[in-house]
Amino acid sequence: MDKMTVRDIEASGKRVLVRVDFNVPLDEETGAITDDSRIRATLPTIEYLIDRGARVILISHLSRPEGKVVDKLRLTVVAQRLSQILGQQVGVTKDCIGAEVEKSVKSLKSGDVLLLENLRFHSAEEMDSPLFARALARLADIYVNDAFGVSHRSHASIVRIAEYLPAVAGLLLEKELSALGGILENPAHPFATILGGAKVRDKVDMLENIMGKVDYLLIGGGMANTFLRAKSYKVGLSLVEPDRLDTVVGLIEKAARNGVRLLLPVDVVVANELSAQAKVKVVSMENVPPECYIADIGPQTVKNFYKELRRCKTVFWNGPMGIYEIPQFAQGTQAIAKLLANLKATTIIGGGSTAEVVTEMGLADKMTFVSTGGGASLKFLGGETLPGVEVLLDKKP
């Protein structure tokens, strides 16, 4: 970390504006939080500031209200959960800028915590508006970015605000950059990367960037279809990215040149339709019926993956192995999660749906590190500079 963190500032009595990522999943019917791990991940920063007598002002988005006030996306439920976890009352405002918010901030005492309303109720947030950033900045003396999951976004509360306040990293952001930076700069070998999810296009830059660093590359999920098609396998009705076939051929050749062992599915779960009522069977890659969809990796593929993974000292995993939202297509993903939980290796989960899987299975604490940012982790591992990190103050030599 060459950026200043909360440890490098004097927080006592100061108004500290902390950008957090409280974009938690909610139950569609009840509106209850179904996974509070993103809230818990920010506790070290919040508690650090409370202990030093700061007046803590938290800002976050929730889902995609697209610049409109959507009552079911208010942050009241998040403030209630945070109050329970912290063991102290966390107030919540009806907006994130304006006279009423300024009044609430003014009433804060040292050690108090206040959560401002959903930033994305204002379209100015995603437009990186200077006026919106300035209105937020008026509330505080110091800005802390602890929202790794959105640090690849050029939004007002992530980037523009650093023009108006001294800006430093929170402890979660520092931990994310340290864990992911470690596998780029100095991973223990053998090093395996497991990639799944729907599309190759989301992971091309990362694949290019890590190709010279990994020993094993294991591909599953929907993105495996394009790799398999590039190797002349028939994939039935499964989605393929035809515009990425040349790219994938290049990646396969690059893996061979770099001595990377590339493992693709050798057997798959196929279904006549992608639903819970579908008829399913396991077939070898040579025998995928033309009228079927590939929905998961098969048991032999899991065995092949495990054979290589048990040799590894570092494993990074991003993306499910199948359509894990449907239980009968989730077995491959769950098998990989269980394998990693029992490995004697550094295991890093690359956020997004993969983090949700290991959390739902109760395996998050068996992993070395579970990232809170899917898109951000892929951008970072793809060699891109994250805008939300770039604007933070550099450490003094």
Image: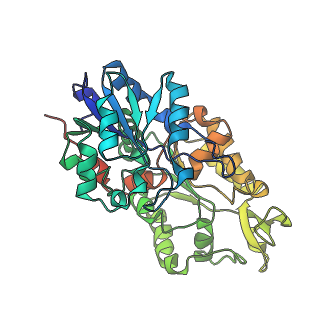
In the rendered image, the residue lying farthest to the left is: 397
Please identify the quadrant where the N terminus is shown: top left
67 w.r.t. 29: above or below? below
Which of 338/304 is in front?
Answer: 338
Residue occupying the point 28% across, 46% down: 136
Residue 280: quarter of image: bottom right
Task: Decide if residue 229 is on the left or right side of residue 294.
Answer: left
176 w.r.t. 327: above or below? above
Task: Decide if residue 42 is on the left or right side of residue 343.
Answer: left
Please identify the quadrant where the C terminus is shown: top left
- Residue 7, position as x, y percentages in the image: 27, 27
- Residue 367, position as x, y percentages in the image: 56, 36
Residue occupying the point 41% across, 63% down: 205
Residue 159 visible within the image = yes
Question: What is the total number of numbered labels drawn onto the structure image?
Answer: 0
Task: Decide if residue 168 is on the left or right side of residue 232.
Answer: left
Which of 186/26 is in front?
Answer: 26
Which of 241/253 is in front?
Answer: 241
